[in-house]
């Protein structure tokens, strides 16, 4: 059975105490989930260390962001080494909220990739088109460009350490999920690009879908051939709704 990543991006939600409580609930439910599920959470920085400790290796833990530099005068930022020490194994790079709200793009994201990989973190790279891109049939062009930018610094041997999340911007937090045909098409295109970039190892890079995933649509989405998991925002904030999604990964 293929492994499926069920990842929760908590965004700017959950105090440390709340984050630990949610992690505990997930950990307790872990033994009842299908064996093929890789449960993962991305808590805010303040909860990271406590969540990693509570997860006890049974739930994967990632950070929502990092700064490309190792250290220095970057008020408010956090480095790859700090994240690793706090217990993060994964890191989100290029989430649309970072791209849109914080104007992150191109070479800055590439620098983050370089820093994450050099430090030994595993990047989960988020890409996706805006509504106007889709309406003007520029989806593939946007995906190609975003992939090229962020993969520019990646050495061939690092290909297998990556993951990609296809997250159409218009589907994030809107309740408007992409159709199965749109998801299948984008995923097979991303796969094609990954194989073109990394050769055969590009076939095993997990490609997740994200954007308004919940218990009502997860089963069909996870059932698609090209989907290796989901990145969940809103529905990951409660154990019940997140676990309902994970149970479909059987
Ligand atoms: P959503 O968020 O599930 O609330 O749409 C997904 C994401 O931002 O990764």
Image: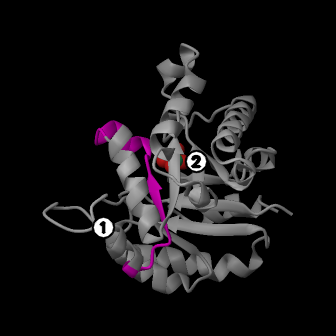
Where's residue 138, x and y in %? 55, 19
Residue at the extreme top:
136
The verdict on label 1 being within 8 Å of ligand 1 is no
Where's residue 193, x and y in %? 65, 37
Q: Is residue 150 visible?
A: yes
Q: What is the secondary structure assignment of the residue under circle 2?
A: strand
Residue at which label 2 appears: 165
> Label 2 vs label 1: CA separation?
22 Å
Q: What stretch is highlighted in magenta?
A: 85-103
The verdict on label 2 being within 8 Å of ligand 1 is yes
Q: Nearer the viewer, mark 2 or mark 1?
A: 1
Query: Relative to residue 136, is residue 228 drawn left or right?
Result: right
**Quarter of the N terminus within the rendering:** bottom right
Taking depth in this image into account, of 129 and 151 the one nearest to the observer is 151
Quarter holding residue 243 = bottom right
Where's residue 141, x and y in %? 55, 24
Q: Dot 1, crowdedness within 10 Å: few (<14), some or many (≥20)?
A: many
Q: What is the secondary structure assignment of the residue under circle 1?
A: loop
Applied colour scheme: one colour
Quarter holding residue 30 = bottom right
Query: Relative to residue 210, is residue 174 drawn left or right?
Result: left
> Against 205, is 56 above or below?
below
**Quarter of the C terminus within the rendering:** bottom right
**Residue at figure coordinates x 38%, y 61% from the top left:** 115
Residue 213: say if magenta: no
Taking depth in this image into account, of 122 and 95 the one nearest to the observer is 122
> Against 15, is 232 above or below?
above
Residue at which label 1 appears: 79
């Amino acid at each position: 059975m293929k492994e499926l990543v069920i990842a929760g991006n908590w965004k700017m939600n959950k105090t440390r105490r709340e984050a630990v409580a949610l992690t505990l609930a997930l950990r307790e439910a872990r033994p009842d989930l299908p064996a093929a599920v890789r449960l993962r959470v991305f808590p805010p920085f303040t909860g990271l260390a406590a969540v990693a400790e509570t997860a006890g290796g049974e739930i994967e833990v990632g950070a929502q962001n990092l700064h490309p530099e190792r250290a220095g005068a970057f008020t408010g930022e956090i480095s790859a080494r700090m994240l690793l020490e706090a217990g993060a194994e994964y890191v989100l790079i290029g989430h649309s909220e970072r791209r849109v709200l914080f104007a992150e793009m191109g070479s800055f994201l590439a620098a983050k990739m370089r820093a994450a990989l050099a430090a030994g973190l595993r990047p989960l790279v988020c890409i996706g088109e805006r509504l106007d891109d889709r309406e003007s049939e520029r989806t593939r062009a946007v995906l190609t460009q975003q992939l090229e930018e962020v993969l520019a610094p990646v050495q061939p041997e690092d290909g297998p350490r990556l993951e990609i999340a296809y997250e159409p911007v218009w589907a994030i937090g809107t309740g408007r999920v992409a159709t199965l045909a749109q998801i299948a098409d984008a995923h097979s295109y991303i796969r094609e690009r990954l194989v073109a970039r990394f050769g055969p190892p590009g076939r095993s890079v997990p490609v997740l879908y994200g954007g308004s995933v919940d218990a009502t649509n997860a089963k069909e989405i996870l059932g698609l051939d090209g989907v290796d998991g989901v990145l969940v925002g809103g529905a990951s904030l409660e154990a019940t709704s997140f676990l309902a999604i994970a149970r479909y990964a059987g």
